[in-house]
């Protein structure tokens, strides 16, 4: 199976849609179209333990997982530079 | 397409709290038959559970919304507040933010609004654009400015 990036937020509607779209667009440019990006409710995250490779969270997370966690808030309120830096970080982590 | 119009815009809104802002904007959306009569109550209930305040610069904003169930047509309603009102931070619900502008979104299918949502996020990330928004003094001017900014119509 290909790699999986989980985008988690409190209610799974608008904010995670923005992050998901930014990440998909960048992955396509990097030739990483086989990486799956899935937005979920934070409350459902346990269903993906063992299957996911990276978590992008729109909220603070008060627990740890066996995969890297990236704070996704810059997708919503960051400058273009901050958004690009976050995408660089995500691409780096998913390629690792 | 996301509907937006001068009657969905309130400039200099005097409101005592987040609930009053949300009810005012949801009332404007309901008057245009974009949402059900209880969309404000739904949105406020969701705001308490999943807050939408954002620590943008140079002033904080909030981005309340509810589930699609009460939405007939996707639309945006915007309030520029006369005085800051407290919303909790989306990323950290324990933190209270003094919010000066509120973007109430009624979204039937978020996937279909991705480009508008991304342009909204671009606006949120640019302090000088948020200042330009707040400098608009009339609902018609806010509408024209924001439609251009978000690529609506």
Image (cartoon, rainbow, N blue to C red):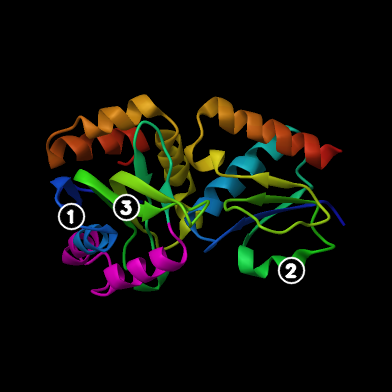
Which residue occupies the foreground of this view, B107 or B51? B51
Q: Would you say B92 lies left or right of B147 here? A: right
- Circles 3 and 1, Cβ within 8 Å, touching? The answer is no
Q: Nearer the viewer, mark 2 or mark 1?
A: 1
Above/below status of A66 relative to B83: below
Image coordinates for residue A93, horizontal then vertical, percent: 79, 39
Q: Chain of mark 1?
A: B
- Regarding residue B81, the answer to whether it shows in the image is no
Element type where label 1 sits in the image: loop
Which residue occupies the foreground of this view, B13 or B75? B13
Q: Residues within 10 Å of mark 2 (few under 14, many from 20)?
A: few
Q: Would you say A21 lies left or right of B7 here? A: right
Q: Residue at x 38, y 28 (%)?
A: B127
Image coordinates for residue A48, horizontal then vertical, percent: 76, 65
Element type where label 3 sits in the image: strand
Element type where label 2 sits in the image: helix
Q: Main secondary structure of the magenta part?
A: helix
Q: Which mark is residue A46?
A: 2
Q: Chain of mark 3?
A: B
Residue A36 drawn in magenta:
no
Q: Which mark is residue B80?
A: none
Which residue lies under the disc numbered 1?
B15
The span picked out in magenta is B25-51
Q: Would you say B59 lies left or right of A32 here? A: left
**Is disc 1 on the same chain as disc 3?**
yes
Which residue lies under the disc numbered 3?
B86
């Amino acid at each position: 199976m290909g790699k999986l990036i989980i985008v988690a937020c409190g209610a799974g509607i608008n904010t995670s849609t923005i992050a998901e779209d930014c990440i998909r667009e960048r992955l396509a440019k990097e030739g990483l179209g086989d990486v799956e990006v899935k937005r979920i409710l934070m409350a459902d995250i346990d269903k993906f333990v063992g299957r996911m490779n990276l978590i992008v969270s729109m909220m603070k997370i008060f627990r740890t997982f066996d995969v890297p966690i990236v704070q996704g808030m810059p997708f919503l309120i960051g400058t273009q530079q901050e958004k690009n830096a976050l995408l660089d970080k995500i691409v780096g982590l998913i390629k690792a | 397409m996301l509907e937006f119009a001068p009657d969905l815009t309130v400039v200099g809104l005097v409101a005592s709290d987040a609930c009053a802002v949300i009810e005012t904007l949801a009332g404007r959306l309901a008057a245009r038959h974009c949402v059900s009569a209880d969309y404000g109550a739904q949105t406020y209930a969701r705001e308490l559970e999943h807050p939408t305040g954002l620590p943008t610069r140079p002033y904080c904003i909030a981005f309340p919304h509810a589930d699609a169930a009460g939405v007939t047509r996707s639309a945006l309603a915007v309030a520029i507040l006369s005085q800051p009102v407290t919303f909790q931070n989306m990323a950290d619900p324990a933190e209270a933010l003094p919010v000066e502008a509120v973007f109430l979104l009624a979204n039937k299918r978020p996937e279909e609004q991705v480009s508008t949502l991304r342009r909204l996020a671009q606006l949120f990330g640019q302090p000088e654009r948020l200042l330009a928004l707040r400098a608009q003094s009339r609902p018609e001017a806010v509408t024209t400015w924001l439609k251009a900014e978000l690529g609506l119509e």
